[in-house]
Amino acid sequence: MEQIQPHIDRAQKFVLDRIPEDRSARFLLAGGTLSVASAVLYPLVLHYALGRQVTLSHLNSGARAASVEVKEIESLPSDVIERSKRYRIYHDKIVKFLPNFTVALSNRNEDIFTRVLRRNMVNFSTTLQGYLLWFAAKDERRTFTKQYIESLDFRDGDLVCGVYRVVKRTPLKAELAIEPTKDLAHVSGLIVITVRPRNEGAILTSETIQWIKKDNGLVLPLERWLYSFMHSITSRSLILKAARYLDEISY
């Protein structure tokens, strides 16, 4: 919030400088205008501020590059890669550098990564998207609770937050399939969270992939501006919180 406030203050000053000098009119216009401006500007400035703290990669839907980029994801159907022209593909990747973490295949690091996954999904369950999923997933609401999530080891088959099913787990990587809902029966997706070595430290990576056959004539949810914007704020915020938590528990 401290990083965002200066941007909001400058925007408010810009508005105030253009309001009439009459005290009554200024008071009424300023109150209404600043309320609206703050409501509009805050998510935009938040999105910008979060983006400055991570490395972002976004590939256009349907691009051949998207299918090449996701080849390392083991649970992605081979048809999506080999016949990418048949699909609409959305792919984004968010990377946070971890200068103080050393990657090693050890039980301790695997345990640390599991704890990061738990914290990440607990945090997700409290976001707007998490609440919307909770509302829709009437039969799986227990999978949103902190007690349930913190009991998971994120092994193959584990379900978390109603629609995320672990389909591949290695010591420092988890691939979660997004199980289709009734409204999005033709849409498939994956969330991939990974820790990898990078220079003298490591990187924490979060990837989101959605795909659908073009002959369905549908648009992917994350191709829509509002959904993409909400997803972007949430995913950036989550990876920053996960990186801070990993830093705290890795000493």
Image (cartoon, helix red, strand yellow):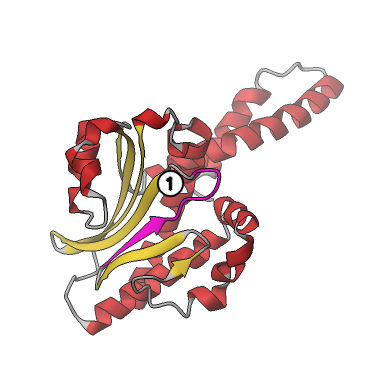
From the top left corner, tell me how far across and down residue 247 is, in percent: 34, 70
From the top left corner, tell me how far across and down residue 227 is, in percent: 51, 38
**Looking at the image, is 250 positioned above or below residue 9?**
below
Q: Is residue 131 left or right of residue 31?
A: left
Q: Nearer the viewer, residue 242 or 201?
A: 242
Q: Secondary structure at mark 1?
A: helix
**Looking at the image, is 65 positioned above or below residue 161?**
above
Could you tell me which residue is drawn at 47 percent across and 80 percent down? Answer: 151
Q: Nearer the viewer, residue 187 or 26?
A: 187
Could you tell me which residue is drawn at 59 percent across and 71 percent down? Answer: 142
**Which residue is situated farthest in the right direction here?**
24
Residue 251 in sight in this render: no
Q: Is residue 188 left or right of residue 132?
A: left
**Looking at the image, is 177 positioned above or below residue 227?**
below
Confirm whether the magenta stretch covers residue 242.
no
Q: Nearer the viewer, residue 193 or 204?
A: 193
From the top left corner, tell me how far across and down residue 110 is, in percent: 27, 77
Q: What's the magenta region?
A: 173-184
Q: Quadrant of the C terminus?
A: bottom left
Q: How many marks?
A: 1
Question: How many C-alpha atoms fall within 10 Å of the one at disc 1: few (<14), some, or many (≥20)?
Answer: some
Q: Which residue is mark 1?
A: 50
Could you tell me which residue is drawn at 44 percent across and 43 percent down? Answer: 232
**Which residue is situated farthest in the left direction here?**
199
Three-letter residue code for mark 1: Leu
